Image: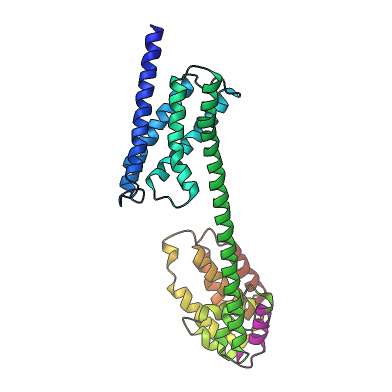
Amino acid sequence: MSNALASLKSILLNLAIVLLAGSLALLLSVRHAHWGPEGPVGAGLLLIPYLFLALIVTVALIVLGTFSWVPGGRWTCFALWVGLMIAFSVSGYYSMADVETKYEELAALLGWFLIIGCLVAVNAAPSVAAKSAIAATLGLGGIAGWIQVLAWLSEYSTEQTQLEESRIAHEQEVKDQQVAAFRALGKDAQLWNYFGYMYNSNAEVQKECHEIIANRADRDDKLIEYLGNEILASDATRYIGEFHPGPGAVLAPAFARRSDLVLSRIGEVNDSDQLSERSYSDIHDIIRAAARIHKGGGDLTPQLQQWRTYLKHFKNTRELLAELDQSLTPASH
């Protein structure tokens, strides 16, 4: 009974190996077909059965104890199986693809050596010669699969390194272009041209930009003009809030109008109890600039109080309210 069962297993395995060889031959036959590996349908219909048969054969060989003589037990067998499946995958792909290098030619031939190894493992009687043949085919095939994994990882690492180097080079090129554009402005261009360099990553450019704006005789006149301009008002507000050397009463009327306009357009109080990130940032810029003008002698008490009334409806405005309270407290004495 046991002999009959062993014979049946051998017959089924040999049949699977024959089908595996037929699948590999089919892959080879469509190498120059336009619907080959470049087409997802061709690749799916032809590679998948080939790999499925390879899976059945290799798992059966391991389960039946064909590699029981290999040192390391089941862990070695598992590593061997993973390597073999990778090797079968590579051989199947290159059997179907138009090969261009010696490596690709060898990879395409690898599948036939693996099939020969499977035939030996199923049919040869246990002997030194059989073990040597299995090691030379399936053993080396499994190792080749792992070597391919290392090659893929190396290629991936190289590609990532190249992408990172390319990104850094591109960023540096952009920075160099920005510096060149800033230098080309000189010191007498329209004031708004310098707003784009207030936060430049080049510390020297940033410092020089602030100095140019600060030393311009028309600085405050232009800031008043820009506060009434929808496009430039935000940049002017940020400059007043962060970099202006001494914003004072001269800016108060224009800034009050800008503050009132922004507040009149906001309608989030009825929609949410959280201020959006964008609105939070914009309002913070306004409050910071208003606080500096207010401290410099420009009376913006009505605007600061209006913002406080508006912001107290939200749960995430504690810091903004604290800034408003700090600005309003001195004015109340």
Q: Quadrant of the C terminus?
A: bottom right
Give the image location of residue 25, x and y in percent: 35, 38
Give the vertical position of 15 relative to 283 (above or below).
Answer: above
Q: Quadrant of the N terminus?
A: top left
Residue 278 lies within the magenta run: no
Q: Residue at 62% x, 89% y: name it.
A: 186
Secondary structure character of the magenta stretch overall: helix
Q: Residue at 60% x, 82% y: name it.
A: 180
Total marks placed: 0
Q: Quadrant of residue 79?
A: top right
Q: Residue 308: tell me if it is visible.
A: no
User: Between residues 273 and 246, which one lies in front from this camera angle?
Assistant: 246
Give the image location of residue 182, x and y in percent: 60, 83
Q: Judge left or right: residue 273 versus residue 170.
A: left
Give the image location of residue 112, x and y in percent: 43, 35
Q: Residue at 62% x, 80% y: name it.
A: 293
Q: Residue at 49% x, 48% y: name it.
A: 102
Residue numbers of the magenta segment: 205-219
Q: Residue 162: tell me if it is visible.
A: yes
Give the vertical position of 300 relative to 274 (above or below).
Answer: below
User: Between residues 220 and 63, which one lies in front from this camera angle?
Assistant: 63
Residue 218 lies within the magenta run: yes
Give the vertical position of 145 relative to 320 (above or below).
Answer: above
Q: Judge left or right: residue 66 versus residue 249.
A: left
